[in-house]
Image: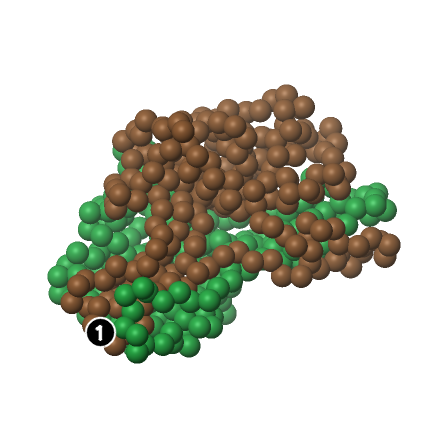
Chain colours: A green, B brown
Amino acid sequence: MSELPPSNRATVKRQPRRGVYDRATIDAILDQGLICHVGFSVDGETFVIPTIHVRVGDKVYLHGSRASRMMQALADGAQACLAVTIVDGLVLARSAFHHSMNYRSVVLFGKASIVEDDADKVAVLRALTEHLIPGRWADVRGPSEQELRQTMVLAIPIQEASAKLRTGPPKDDDVDYSLPFWAGVIPLRLAAAEAICDPKLRPDIEPPSYAVEYPGPR
Amino acid sequence: MSELPPSNRATVKRQPRRGVYDRATIDAILDQGLICHVGFSVDGETFVIPTIHVRVGDKVYLHGSRASRMMQALADGAQACLAVTIVDGLVLARSAFHHSMNYRSVVLFGKASIVEDDADKVAVLRALTEHLIPGRWADVRGPSEQELRQTMVLAIPIQEASAKLRTGPPKDDDVDYSLPFWAGVIPLRLAAAEAICDPKLRPDIEPPSYAVEYPGPR
């Protein structure tokens, strides 16, 4: 199992015991995360933008309009900091101080490169779609040449990254365990409700299995 | 309903029709968001860190250890960009290109100030706890003087902020509506599972209603 050599900025400083640098853990969080938040700076201003991502091998891919401020900044060489966070639960301790969350997060630093080749871009868009909605690509009209031209695809290598995790029950101060307060975990997850058909849907088309029982990102 | 005068950096550039600047919309998203992602730059490096927040009146509050890189940077005057994103559903169009998400997001820019007064800090910690787990504050051992000293509380004014939303069904190109593909929305929400008691819980204590039927942040 490969381990990333942590750079200073990618080293978990707070609660360092929660820091993990192995690629299997990092990849699993990137793959199960529905969205990411991308930070970058332009002319001394820092921005954070939510967007979707997909990991393929040793890279994380983003896509967007060529007109997007984020895509332009990253394409122009701005350093990106990409965060993927999955909240697994609320941790209720007896003391306010020890309340916490169970979570899995990845922070990835790097510079993006532009994916220029059309076939490569389509492969990334396919991977993005399959990451979010496994099985969907077989049921879509693929991108036209014009749509591909409008879409920028960027790749960020997974070289400087760390994962941070918390699991398990609360940890209270010894003297607090006798307090008359409930303590434990409220597990949280992203849940899908019943799929809603487009009002303009052809009446002969039923919702496919991946929409009826949406499995979550993969 | 108050409307923020949008600054350049807080103006929604992509899909400007999705941009909203009224405080009621912004506040509702801040209040319903479970976590935020905070961007800031130190010595030319941009970081994005997930953390929890609470809005009280015209400010968003963060808290953390005095030793935290993020808290130190913000306390030292780094510009913060705070993003809160709620994903409401996956939008499946007939074309790959028009796939989208339904979401509500806020991006807030500002500089933090330190909340110094102990009573004010306790009020923020109480609001944070009640935001995440309504009803919990009555059931906790409050912060000790030492815990308060270790905890830094920061306030960011809601002055430069925008919301961005997408709702509703997919929008396809006219020619694509006849394609034989399902289209619609898979609604998503954060769901709580059955509360898990701390293995060290006193046997006479039952889970409280806010843990049995967790209502989500407020």
Query: Which residue is located at x 54 percent, y 25 percent?
Result: B114
- Residues B29 and A148: in front is B29
Q: Amino acid at mark 1?
A: Leu
Tally of marks: 1
- Residues B194 and B68: in front is B194
Q: Horizontal placement of B214 versus B159: left or right?
A: right
Residue B216 picture location, percent across and down: 58, 49
Q: Which quadrant does the C terminus of chain A fall into?
A: bottom left
Quadrant in the picture for residue B6:
top left
- Residues A162 and A206: in front is A206
Above or below, comparing residue B4 to residue A4 in the picture: above
Residue A202 picture location, percent across and down: 27, 73
Above or below, comparing residue A105 to residue B11 in the picture: below
**Residue beneath label 1, please?**
B179
Name the element at disc 1.
loop
Residue B118 picture location, percent across and down: 67, 24
Query: Which residue is located at x 63 percent, y 21 percent?
Result: B117
- Residues B166 and A28: in front is B166
